Image (tube, rainbow, N blue to C red):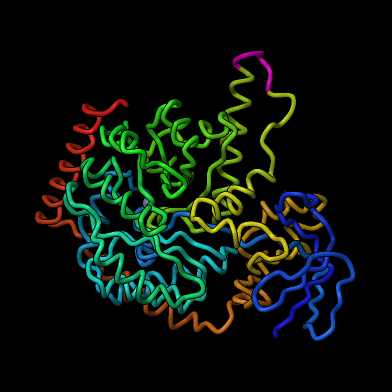
Amino acid sequence: MTRVLLSGAQVVSLAPNRPDTECTDVLIENGRIAAMGGHLDPTGAEVIDLTDRIVIPGLVNAHLHTWQTALRFAGADWSLLEYLAHTHGHVARIYSQGDMHIGTLAGALNQINCGTTTVGDWCHNCLTPGHADAAIDALTTAGIRAVFLHGAGHGGPAKPHDLREIDRLYDGPIANSALLTLGMAIKGPQLSAPDAVIADLRAAIERGLVASMHQSAGPPGPGWNDVSAAGLWGPHANIVHGTGLTDEWVKRLTDAGVSFTSTPENELGQGHCTAITQQLLRLGAAPSLGTDTETAVSGEVLTAARITLARHRGLAHEQELHRTGLGAPTIALTSKQALSWATVHGARALGLADRVGHLAPGMQADLVVIDGRALNLWPAHDPIGAALQASIANIEAVMIAGHWRKRHHTLVDTDIDEVKDRLQQSGEQFAHKIRATGPVARTRRRVVRMVVRRHLSRQARSGGT
Ligand SMILES: [Zn+2]
């Protein structure tokens, strides 16, 4: 039996029925939290002194396309349409299995480095079974906990998900993994025909899988009503962005247990329009958070939490200013809420709330050690506020299922230079194609943009539900 005793840290467990912060020992046995409390028996345990550190639950990045990591910041100034044209309309189609592997590996390792222990890996470029296998192998190599959300490329809207592939993965590479679970990255009502989305959601429910779908930058299409009529909304469904849904729709979906994931930085920048978070908060619900695509923004989910908190505090102040002529006298949204979006609610969105997202006996030992001695955090009078404001440089250690994946500010058992070399080789070929300025490249971009615009305007005409 392996036993590790973490002692002396300020622990932010985010568990119900525990203090917000407490100086308590955490005993870990065989990958799980065995006990939390003062003066736990250290017999047979490796005792680690974490004085002046803050321990929080492992972060959950509920929506990320790790396969795009080699395209980092190629789209720092793209709109959503430009992103779709360059990425899905072009380079995604020429991704090899090797490109999928190195993008996923580098993306997953970066997540661990940032304090993420669980990622919802929205892998919507599984062009062949080999592409899916390569991505799964990379997640396993990285040692991260993940829901592998299998998705095909952006094909025709009427086509349902390839269930032979879902069943192959379900019985094969993922069945034997302690850290990976399978989910479905479906096109959803916005991008597929009603019959297709109904078939996809039925398949997910039958298999007990999370089905995640995008919805943004336009009103919802008619398929949403069809799914409601078929009674297929529930906790298995996860909606990413969720922008364009009316308050009535958001209430209907949250009442059914549907989860929402906001990816605030690229939603604001690319033009996904109004974020769902305010609608959820008004209903007493909460978002999970993701960072979506490193073509545009960094992968730090704590940054996503800070942006969301600042944005919605700002909106509240503005509303109060309009109403009374003065700013709000008190702050309604708390740092603890923001941290829970990146932990507790992420775990719920990915169907993993029974094992990760908060720290308590019986839960998986997925946790992050933040170095509270750092110049940018000391003296951390409020451990929750300090944890939320922590940067990558403050993430001292990361444990997943009882294994250290980062220790002493360094990823464990990882040849970073080798990973970077492979990532660069993969990315250069795509960057070259994206930068192309010849007549063929210009025509292709024009056509892809036209197709995307036509699709969105057709949807806008038929939507409005
Ligand atoms: Zn996405």
**Above or below: residue 78 compared with residue 242:** below
The front one of 274 and 400 is 400
User: Which residue occupies the extreme top position in the image?
Assistant: 324
Residue appearing at x 55%, y 84% in the figure:
413
The answer to whether residue 161 shows anywhere in this view is yes
User: Which residue occupies the extreme right position in the image?
Assistant: 39
Q: In which quarter of the image is residue 227?
A: top left
The answer to whether residue 65 shows anywhere in this view is no
Is 260 placed left or right of 173 in the picture? right
Residue appearing at x 78%, y 52% in the figure:
18
- In percent of width and height, residue 3 lies at 74, 81
Is 177 placed left or right of 2 in the picture? left
- Quadrant of the frame with the N terminus: bottom right
- In percent of width and height, residue 249 lies at 41, 30
- In percent of width and height, residue 229 lies at 31, 33
Residue appearing at x 63%, y 72% in the figure:
399
Residue 456 on the magenta span: no
Is 97 placed left or right of 72 in the picture? left
Residue appearing at x 21%, y 26% in the figure:
461
**Above or below: residue 422 compared with residue 391:** below
- In percent of width and height, residue 194 lies at 23, 40
**Above or below: residue 26 compared with residue 381:** below
The front one of 160 and 316 is 160
Q: In which quarter of the image is residue 91?
A: bottom left
For the record, the magenta segment spans 322-327
**Above or below: residue 439 compared with residue 193:** below
